[in-house]
Image: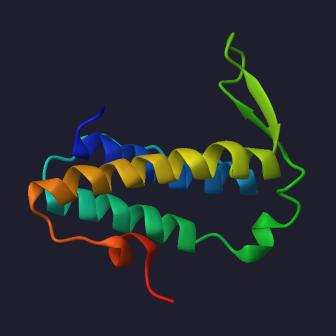
Amino acid sequence: MFPLIRQVQVAADFAKSVSARLVGIEVPVYEDNEQTFADLQARISKTLLFIESLAPKQFEGSGTREIVLRPGTPKEKKLLGHNYLTNYGLPQFFFHVTTAYAILRPNGLGVGKGDFMGTF
């Protein structure tokens, strides 16, 4: 299992890369140099700012857009946007967020289900 810092990095990477690919733009590249909680919070904030910069109109038609993962390699995979989001991107994102949560909670951070799920 990746340590906490890597889990947060990967979760942020999926959040930005899935969004970018669905709208058909270049995926932003981040250095993986975070070492503190403040660094991780900054990465999350940067990721949220990127996602918030995308207009809803940019996502129009993304469900049928072809997404190519690892282009030109033996592991190349082509998916329609809807399948990419629901069967690959979201499960990957939630796996890493859940794993980060699972690392934090038994180590004394007072997080609960509401912190993970939010409030309704």
Question: Could you say which is closer to the camera, residue 114 or residue 30?
Answer: 114
Q: Is residue 68 left or right of residue 12?
A: right
Q: Residue at x 60, y 52 (%)?
A: 90
Q: Residue at x 28, y 72 (%)?
A: 112
In the rendered view, would you say 111 is above or below 100?
A: below
- Residue 99 picture location, percent across and down: 35, 48
The residue furthest left is 108
Q: Residue at x 70, y 45 (%)?
A: 87
Q: Is residue 92 left or right of residue 60?
A: left
Residue 114 found in image quarter = bottom left
Q: Is residue 3 left or right of residue 18?
A: left
Question: Dividing the image into 4 quarters, which one contains the N terminus?
Answer: top left
Total tally of numbered discs in the picture = 0
The residue furthest top is 74
- Residue 21 picture location, percent across and down: 69, 48
Q: Is residue 107 left or right of residue 19?
A: left
Colour scheme shown: rainbow
Residue 107 found in image quarter = bottom left
Question: Could you say which is closer to the camera, residue 6 or residue 47?
Answer: 6
- Residue 41 picture location, percent across and down: 26, 64
Q: Residue at x 46, y 70 (%)?
A: 49
In the rendered view, would you say 94 is above or below 88?
A: below
- Residue 74 picture location, percent across and down: 69, 10
